[in-house]
Image (tube, rainbow, N blue to C red):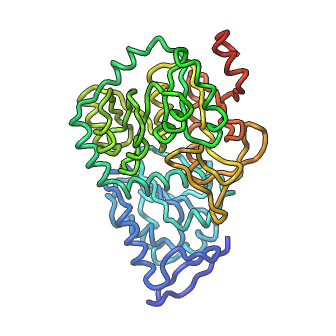
Amino acid sequence: MKFEILKAKNGENTLKVNNLFLYGKYRPVEDASRFIDKEYDKEAKGYLLVGLGLGYHLMALHKLIEPHKELIVFVLNKKEKDFFKDSEIERELRHRKNIKLIYNISDLVLNTDYQIIIPHVWLSVMGQDHPLYSFFMDIKIKQMSYKRFAPLLEQNFKINIQLDDFKLMRIKESIKDKKIAALVSSGPSLNETKNWLKNIKEDIFILSVGSALKPLLNAEVTPHAVIISDPQPLIMKQFSDIQYNGDLFYLCTADNNTVNSHKHNRCVLLQNGYPFAEKLAAELKYPTLDTGGSVATLAFSLLEYIGFEQVILFGQDLGFTGSESHVSGSTSGRNVGEAEKLLMIECNADKVISTTNTLYSYLKWFNNAVQNTSVEVYNTALYGAKIEGSQFLNEQQFCKLFSKGSI
C-alpha cells in the first residue's frame, strides 16, 4: 500500500492510500465524523472498525460509544501504526481500556453482537487479494442494502403480517414425505437443465425463485412453489402475464403488492437478523430462517428447515462464462459490462469463470451452508461456480437418481 499524508484545504492532515483519499480533501475530520454518525448503531454490544488511518474514524466513534463497550480497530498496514503513533489522537486515547488495536488476522475474533464498521474506501485499498476482502465486502453489501431499503422493509412488514399467512409448520408437516427438492434459480445454466424437470414432478418438490418462474413455465414445468424476498415493487413483473396457481413463500419484508396479488395459498417467512421479525417470531413461537442475502440462499434455508434429505440446485451458477448473468426469459436478466470488476473462480467443469462481488458473497454463503448441513446437495450447473461440499450432477445421473434412488 502506498500512503501519502497531505494537507486538506482547511489545514488538517488527510490521507491518500493507493491514490485514493481515505478522508475528504477539504474537511477530513468532519467527513470522518459524519460517516461514523450515519453508520453508528448505539444498540450494538461492541464495535469493530476496519482500518486505522490517521485515527479520525476511531476518534469519532469513541466519542459516541459508552465507556464499557469494547472498540476493536483492525489495522490493515504497519504504516498506519507509524502515522498514528504519538499523534494527538493517539495520546488522547492511549489509556482508554476499551480500545484495542489488532494487527494480525489470527488475533481477530469476531463477535456477532458487535457492529462492523467499514469505511467505503478501505475495501478498494485492501484489494481482492486480501484474505478478508470477500468477507468484508459481503458485510458491506448487506449493510448498504439494508440502509437503502429500511423504510420500505418496515412498510412491507407491517402490511404483510396482517395477512396472517403463518403456515410454515403446517406446510412442513404436509410435505414431510417428499425427500428430494429442486431449488430452481435463474442462472444461465437453466437454459440447458430446465427440461430435466418435465416428467418427474411427482417425485420431487420443485421450489422456484421468482425470477425463474417464467422460464420454467415456458418449458412446461410448473413448480410446486415460488419464493420471493425482494422489497421492491419491480418484482411484480415476475408474475405478470402468466397463470400460476401454486404456493407462494414470501419473506415478511417482500413487496406487499406482489404478495397481495397472489390469491392462492401463501406462507410468510420470518428472517434472522431483522429485529421486527425476530420479535414477532418469539411472540408467535414461529420459525426464523437465515436469508444469506439472496432469494436463493433464503430458499435453501427453507428447504433445509422443511427437512428434505436431498436438494438439487438448478440455475445456481453464481457466475458466468459470457456476458449473460441469467437464463433467457428471466425477469432479472442483464448483460455484464466489460467495465465491471470481476473475480475469477473455479466452476464445475474444472475451468475458470467470472463472477461479481455480490454473487461471490452468495457463493461464500452456500459454501458454508452446504458444508454444515446434513442435506445432500447436488449442483447441475456445469459452468456454474463450484460450491464446496456439493456434488455435480449431469442429466444421466439426475435420471438415475429417480430410477434407482441413488446415483
In front here: 173 or 211? 211
Q: Residue at x 39, y 51 (%)?
A: 234
Visible in this render: residue 297? no
- The answer to which image quadrant residue 385 occupies is top right
Q: Residue furthest right?
A: 350
Quarter of the image for the C terminus: give it.
Answer: top right
User: x, y (%) of residue 290?
Assistant: 44, 36
Decide which of 209, 221 is in the foreground and name it.
221
**Residue at the spot 77% in from the left edge and 38% down from the top edge:** 349
Task: Residue 396: name its quadrant.
Answer: top right
Q: Left or right? Give the position of 339 relative to 250.
A: right
Return the x and y of residue 225 as percentages of the image width and height.
43, 28
Which is nearer the eye, 164 or 324? 324
Residue furthest left in the image: 162
**Coordinates of residue 404 in the picture (x, y in percent):** 67, 9
Q: Is residue 345 left or right of residue 61?
A: right
